[in-house]
Structures are given as C-alpha cells and as structure tokens.
Image (tube, grey):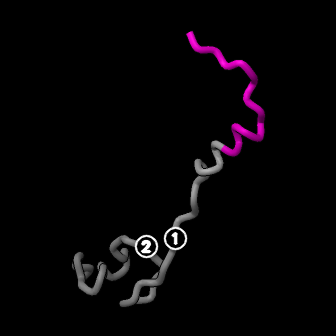
Amino acid sequence: MAVPKRRTSKARSKKRRSHNSIKPVQIANCPQCHTPTPTHSICPNCGYYQGRVLVDMDD
C-alpha cells in the first residue's frame, strides 16, 4: 500500500485548495427595467432575457 514519505506542508495543501473558494454572484442591471439581477438569468421583475420577453409578468 502506498504511504506518503513526508508530511504535506500547510502551504502546499493550501496552494492546492486555492481554487476551491466560493466566488461572489455577479449582479448586472436588466437592460429593460434596470433592476439588479444575476447574470444569465431571466429578470424577476419584467421577465426579459437576451432581447426578448420570456415570461409574461402581467399581474
């Protein structure tokens, strides 16, 4: 069975985990109603996405 010859240092293990951090959600304004919305998602206020209305929001 394979066993490590030397203990993995703290710096080496933290370098390996440097890409595992949680990134903040990108927020952009809707071009139609200017409501802050997450990128690549339908606007919850007007239903607008990529130049067209996908969800009819008439109440």
Residue lying farthest to the top in this orientation: 1
Given the image, on which type of amino acid does mark 2 rest?
Answer: Thr
Answer yes or no: do the residues labelled 2 and 1 have beta carbons within 8 Å?
yes
Given the image, on which type of amino acid does mark 1 rest?
Answer: Gln
Q: Residue at x 41, y 84 (%)?
A: 30
In magenta segment, residue 48: no
Which residue in the structure is indicated by mark 2? 39
Residue 26 marker:
1
Give, as a single range, the part of the protein colored magenta: 1-15
Q: Earlier in the sequence, mark 2 or mark 1?
A: 1
Name the side, left or right, on which 54 lies relative to 17.
left
Query: How many C-alpha atoms fall within 10 Å of the one at disc 1: few (<14), some, or many (≥20)?
Result: few
Q: Residue 38: name its quadrant.
A: bottom left
Q: Is residue 43 among the parts visible in the rendering?
A: yes
Name the side, left or right, on which 27 lies relative to 59.
right
Query: How many C-alpha atoms fall within 10 Å of the one at disc 2: few (<14), some, or many (≥20)?
Result: some
Q: Residue at x 67, y 19 (%)?
A: 4
Q: Quadrant of the C terminus?
A: bottom left
Q: Residue at x 63, y 44 (%)?
A: 17
Q: Main secondary structure of the magenta part?
A: loop
In magenta segment, residue 4: yes
Q: Is residue 59 among the parts visible in the rendering?
A: no
Please name whichever residue, 43 or 50, is drawn nearer the observer in this view of the structure.
50
Q: Position of residue 29 (x, y in %)?
A: 47, 83
Q: Residue 15: name its quadrant.
A: top right
